[in-house]
Amino acid sequence: MTQTHSKSRQQAELAFGKLQTPFFAKNHAVDELQAAVDARDAKTARLKAARLAKELADRKSAVAALVTKRTKKTPSACPTS
């Protein structure tokens, strides 16, 4: 069922449509920017977690190496007289 509108109504509808398009385009741009920010934050969090895990593993291996080195230097038996 098609309705026929007056010429002024048709012009108003057309003008409103032209105004509405940039408005929705702005919302779309904001959504794209927010998606980029969210992706960057997720990547930063993932990289930070990986870096912290690597630093912890490096610290543990360094401590283990020091403990091994110290146990090799200390004499296993003290000479008794």
Image (cartoon, helix red, strand yellow):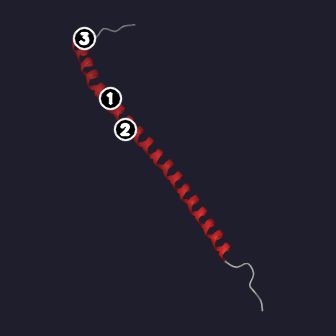
Q: Who is closer to the viewer here, 45 or 63? A: 63
Within-10-Å neighbours for mark 2: few <14, some 14–19, many 20+: few
The amino acid sitting under disc 2 is Leu
Percent x, y of residue 38: 44, 42
Percent x, y of residue 64: 63, 66
Which residue is label 2 attached to?
A: 33
Residue 74 against residue 39 in the figure, above or below:
below
For the point 67% across and 78% down, which residue is it? 74
For the point 65% across and 75% down, which residue is it? 73
Dividing the picture into quarters, in which one does residue 28 lie? top left
Percent x, y of residue 36: 40, 39
Which residue is label 3 attached to?
A: 6
The amino acid sitting under disc 3 is Ser
Dividing the picture into quarters, in which one does residue 31 lie? top left
Q: Of tags 2 and 1, which is closer to the observer?
A: 2
* For residue 71, side relative to residue 59 (left or right): right
